[in-house]
Image: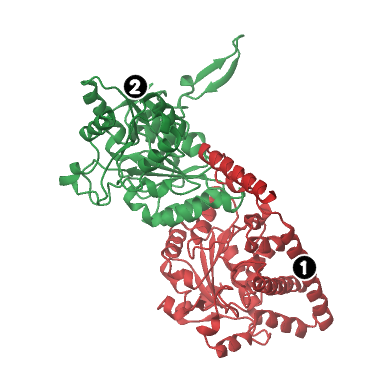
Amino acid sequence: MLYEQFNPLREQQLQVMDKDGRVIRKDLMPKLSNDDLKKIYYYMVLGRAADQKAMNLQRQGRIGTFAPVYGQEAQVASAYALQQGDWVVPAFREHALALVRGMPLKNFYLYYMGHETGSVVPKDARILPVSVPVGSHPLHAVGIAWASKIRKEKNVAITYFGDGATSEGEFHEAMNFAGVLKVPVIFYCQNNQWAISVPRKIQTASRTIAQKAVAYGMPGIQIDGNDIFAVYAATKEAVDRARRGEGPYFIEAVTYRFGPHTTADDPTKYRDEKEVEFWKQRCPVMRLKKYMTNLGIWDDSQEKKLLEAVDKEIETAVADAEKTPIATVDEIFDNTFAQLTPQLAEQKAYLKKVMEEKKTRTQK
Amino acid sequence: MVKITILEAINKALNYEMNRDSSVVVLGEDVGKEGGVFRATEGLQQKYGAERVVDTPLAEAGIVGSAIGMAINGLKPVCEIQFFGFIYPAINQIINHASRMRTRSRGLYTCPLVIRTPYGIGIKALEHHSESTEAYFIHTPGLKVVIPSTAADAYGLLLSAIRDPDPVLFLEPTKLYRAFKEEVPIDEGDKKALDKKESDKSGNITKTVKAGEYTVPIGKARIVQEGMDCTLISWGAMVKECEKAAELLAKEEIFPEIIDLRTVSPMDKEAILASVKKTGRAVIVQEAPRTLGLSSEISSIITENSMADLQAPVIRVTSFDIIPPLPKAEHYYAPDPYRIYRGVKKVLSY
């Protein structure tokens, strides 16, 4: 098992491919076909381009505040290790991997444009809505996995969160419940080293985040989170193990966000440009591209074709999202409970009346 | 018909629902072997196993947060929080997640879960064991809040709460847990012989009503006693105090109508307004601190809707904006029959 070979207490880190796209641990290379690699690459490129488009839209005021995934696209490979029926419980920087699970790209734009329907994914995608209150959602993954165990199903749950989330109390409750109840859940920490302006060393005195798993009685492994092979291999091991009924697993994926926390902050205020440059040399997208190019399965013309296709996909998604009508008064009331309460019916009727009155006033 | 305490009613309701629906699970601190600190879950683990009646680690956010996941993935969790004063670590899960999941996902994911917890003053308990801060939760869209004050309502409302497709906070007045035995219209046991058969004219059985089947709808108040002189509106343990106050008032030929809200969110506005229309006077009795409690909301509703019916200002009889005192001085705190009597006399003086 990988977690037995890489001890987080000794600060050992799983890396299969180096920063230049060369495989340094052939023995640990996961089984992925050339087609798999191209698919993973496609989602990473799509995630990045979708992000850049959203950034532009935000600057133009066509989209609200959002948290870019830029730099953390290797997350795609972790979702790639899941099976149909498995559950994903994300935080708010997981839109690249959400696409792998079948979230339509349009939904990403819808949500950040301000439509709740952005969270309405196809039923079999089994991905929960974005979770903004940091560190509180891993508990939902624990509950989902727990239910799966009680119902004797084989589905596992994976939850994503950042290094900052590991300081929250509910994160620790989730780890503790998972360990005690031995539920099939995978904790995937995207340690991007910054929680808005606060660096990783201010979040915890632990030398690694992965070592926290030891205290909760579950395997923990630190991996190179920008190496899709390490990401895939560790997640696959965790998922298979959980599916066999052997309990939870913790992965600390060391990565880096190239951009701001959200469109509302300026990272040049709190971190050194040199650090950003260092990590850009370890860009997950570039590394996979180099690997595929060296392997002879990728060239410039394929790259060009891919980028064109991705751009087209994004343009369509944005256009569709922008055409989406604003939620009706009925919609914002009717989803509070399964059945409208008398109070809500009264409030809804009032709002409808006011909206009508406003309309006739402006017509005059 | 059985004669049981509120506590026994809760235990029986849980048993009935767990037996009827295999997706119902109970989780909380000491709910298994111990059967809960008040024994509300006694015998359930022996009967349904440790997988469905779970002793969890001591963490309230953990209990509610994982129940949210369970509910999303097809189970119906009934959480027990040991005392209402310990629910606050879970408030993030309740407000930010359980109550909003339906809206946020437009119904794709829902949280049909129940959080049960002993509530209120009156058992000479330790600090933090006498909270009646239901207002924090009533203020939360997407959450229902239920407070029974009789054994029959405890049983019938708990069945409804477990079957409700949305999250329900179920507050159980600790003071009343074992205070009296009351009739609940169910028959003992799950034996088929006790099931009631309904048949059509030609004698064919059309429907079998299970012996334990008794529900009370969420959102409907109960008229405890009818009267013409004033409307007394209350919930939880204060309902019994209102009944005692009515005895004092009866000696002076004053007959209040007493309403037990039973569900405090969503509240039965119609029942309140219908009664005020009849009596023209209202006194609201609340165990919680005075400022911004449910009584303030009820008072607003009455003045907004029934100004023409009112013959006196609406009066609130409440606890005070102080920390509930420890047992020796507890008697200063909550409304008692005399304070309620005084409130009624005041609205009658106009």
Q: Secondary structure at mark 1?
A: helix
x, y percent for residue B202? 62, 9
Which residue, as the protein is rendered here, is positioned at the far top? B202
Of A128 and B270, which appears nearest the observer?
Answer: B270
In this rendering, is residue A228 above or below B275? below
Mark 2 Cα shell of 10 Å, populated few (<14), some (14-19), many (≥20)? some
Tell me the amino acid under the disc marked 2.
Answer: Met
In this rendering, is residue B268 above or below B107? above
Quarter of the rendering containing residue A88: bottom right
Q: Residue at x 69, y 49 (%)?
A: A363
Which residue, as the protein is rendered here, is positioned at the far front? A364
Chain identity for the colour red used in the image:
A
Pick the quarter of the image with the C terminus of chain B: top left
> In this image, A320 relative to B230: left or right?
right
Question: Do labels 2 and 1 touch, CB within 8 Å?
Answer: no
Chain B: colour as depicted: green
Q: Which residue is mark 1?
A: A315
x, y percent for residue A169? 41, 64
x, y percent for residue A132? 53, 63
Of A294 and A60, which appears nearest the observer?
Answer: A60
Mark 1 Cα shell of 10 Å, populated few (<14), some (14-19), many (≥20)? some
Tell me the amino acid under the disc marked 1.
Answer: Glu
Q: Secondary structure at mark 2?
A: loop
Quarter of the rendering containing residue B258: top left
Identify the subunit bearing mark 1: A
Q: Is residue B32 visible?
A: no
Of A277 and B208, which appears nearest the observer?
Answer: A277
Q: Is residue A187 visible?
A: yes
The mark found on residue A155 in the picture is: none
Q: Which residue is mark 2?
A: B228
